[in-house]
Each structure stands twice: as C-alpha cells, then as structure tokens.
Image (cartoon, rainbow, N blue to C red):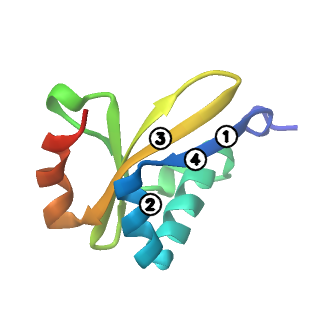
Amino acid sequence: MDKRERFSYEIQYTKAADKFLKTHEDVREQYEDAVKELLVGEQPEKVDVKRIKGKRNDYYRIKLGGYRVVYTVINGKIVVISTLLAESRGDVYKKMNGLK
C-alpha cells in the first residue's frame, strides 16, 4: 500500500467560497478532483498549485482554467483543506485583502 493512501482529508469551505462554488459546480468538481490528486493521486505534479507570495505565504492557489481557488492546509491526522476564496482570475487576488 502506498504511503499517500494512509490518511484521510476533509475539505471545508468559507461562506464566500461555498457561495461561489454553488453557482459554479463544474469548478467545485474540478477543485475537489485537484485536491484528491494532490493528496492521494498518482500524479500530483499535474495540479497547477502555487504558494501565495508575501504576507499570505501560508495560502495556496489552484488554477482551474480562468478561475483560482485559494486555500490553506491544517495538518494533523486528518488533513483539513480550508477553502478561503474562489473567483475568476482577475478578482480573487483583489478579494484576498479582506481575508483574516
């Protein structure tokens, strides 16, 4: 058994991210598939993920076509992905200033 399969993970959404993803179910599905590939997949390097630079260096973004999903990771026995924002490419970085 591969070591990558020995833990579980959970995806949590902020109200803002959930609201956006409810109206963009295709983006939600792509995002959840990307997280699964990153954590337990055979080819995690195929996911376009980058660390956010600057003050928010504990945040990451996944590129999904013209959309970006910003998240952070909380480690433990269960890896919790806290999804902070999901917006179009031009808007997501502008809205990051409002994140706590």
Task: State the residue position of label 1.
Answer: 9
Residues at circles 1 and 4 in contact by the CB criterion of under 8 Å: yes
Q: Nearer the viewer, mark 4 or mark 2?
A: 2
- Residue 9 lies left or right of residue 100; in this view the side is right
Q: CA distance from mark 1 to mark 4?
A: 7 Å
Task: State the residue position of label 4.
Answer: 11
- Tell me which label, 3 or 2, sits earlier in the chain: 2
- Tell me which label, 1 or 2, sits earlier in the chain: 1
- The three-letter amino acid code for the residue at tag 4 is Ile
Q: CA distance from mark 3 to mark 2?
A: 11 Å
- The three-letter amino acid code for the residue at tag 2 is Asp
Within-10-Å neighbours for mark 4: few <14, some 14–19, many 20+ = some
Q: Residue at x 59, y 62 (%)?
A: 33
- Helix, strand or loop for disc 1: strand
**Which of the 4 image quarters holds residue 72?**
top left
Task: State the residue position of label 2.
Answer: 18
**Which of the 4 image quarters holds residue 39?**
top right
Q: Nearer the viewer, mark 3 or mark 2?
A: 2
- The three-letter amino acid code for the residue at tag 3 is Ser
Q: CA distance from mark 1 to mark 2?
A: 18 Å
